[in-house]
Image (tube, rainbow, N blue to C red):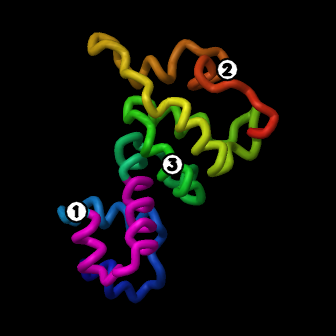
């Protein structure tokens, strides 16, 4: 908790804050209380940071690729966890979409998958979401739309 409250190096990056909150062993509301985050907006902001850090930790996303996209990661957290890796890869810039998804586009795509059932247990769900697509991850799930380019 001292890292969050007494950081002399400057402001922590949102993913650092979220990771610290995850590793603290405290619930997000308790962490917020101890950090002095009393306003609803501050607590929601902490929850977004924590959600983003959770996605990074579970997917192994490379920090340089996602550092500036922590809000995208917070939106991806609402999707079924078995889709997180594929959604992270799909939202990043690539040869077909040099800018990658906006936060709004990420939110829209995640909304499409919110109630998607996981494949049977005998199927590796993450591999299923990411594999077998000549166009990359989730090509079979995500339609190409001009607003995403």
Left or right, 95 with reference to 50: right
In the rendered image, which residue does mark 3 sit on?
75
Viewer-nearest of discs 3 and 2: 3
Magenta span contains residue 49:
yes
When asked about the image quadrant of residue 4, the answer is bottom left
Q: Secondary structure under badge 2?
A: loop
Q: Main secondary structure of the magenta part?
A: helix
Magenta span contains residue 19:
no
Give the residue displayed 54% in from the left and 56% down from the top. 71
Give the residue displayed 38% in from the left and 35% down from the top. 81
- Disc 3 and disc 2: Cα gap in Å? 23 Å
The percent position of residue 133, horizontal first and vertical second, equals 60, 15
Q: Quadrant of the C terminus?
A: top right
Give the residue displayed 63% in from the left and 26% down from the top. 142
Residue furthest to the right: 146
Q: Along the line of sight, which residue is nearer the eye, 40 or 47?
A: 40
Of the two numbered discs 1 and 2 on the same chain, state the one appearing first in sequence.
1
Give the residue displayed 51% in from the left and 48% down from the top. 75
Of the two numbered discs 3 and 2 on the same chain, state the one appearing first in sequence.
3
Look at the image and give the residue range highlighted in magenta. Answer: 28-53
Q: Is residue 111 above or below residue 38?
A: above
Q: Residues within 10 Å of mark 1 (few under 14, many from 20)?
A: few
The percent position of residue 53, horizontal first and vertical second, equals 40, 55
Q: Which mark is residue 27?
A: 1
Q: Is residue 108 above or below residue 131?
A: below
Q: Secondary structure under badge 3?
A: helix
Q: Secondary structure under badge 1?
A: loop
- Disc 1 and disc 2: Cα gap in Å? 40 Å
In the rendered image, which residue does mark 2 sit on?
135
- Disc 3 and disc 1: Cα gap in Å? 20 Å
């Amino acid at each position: 908790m001292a890292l969050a409250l007494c950081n002399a190096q400057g402001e922590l990056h949102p993913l650092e804050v979220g990771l610290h909150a995850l590793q603290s062993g405290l619930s997000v509301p308790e962490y917020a209380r101890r950090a002095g985050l009393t306003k609803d907006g501050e607590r929601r902001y902490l929850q977004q940071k924590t959600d983003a850090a959770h996605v990074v930790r579970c997917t192994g996303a490379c920090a340089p690729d996602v550092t500036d996209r922590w809000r995208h990661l917070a939106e991806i957290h609402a999707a079924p966890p078995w889709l997180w890796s594929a959604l992270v890869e799909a939202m990043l810039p690539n040869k077909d979409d040099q800018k990658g998804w906006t936060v709004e586009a990420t939110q829209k795509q995640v909304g499409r998958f919110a109630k998607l059932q996981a494949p049977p247990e005998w199927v590796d769900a993450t591999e299923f979401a990411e594999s077998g697509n000549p166009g990359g991850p989730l090509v079979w799930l995500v339609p190409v739309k001009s607003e995403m380019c």
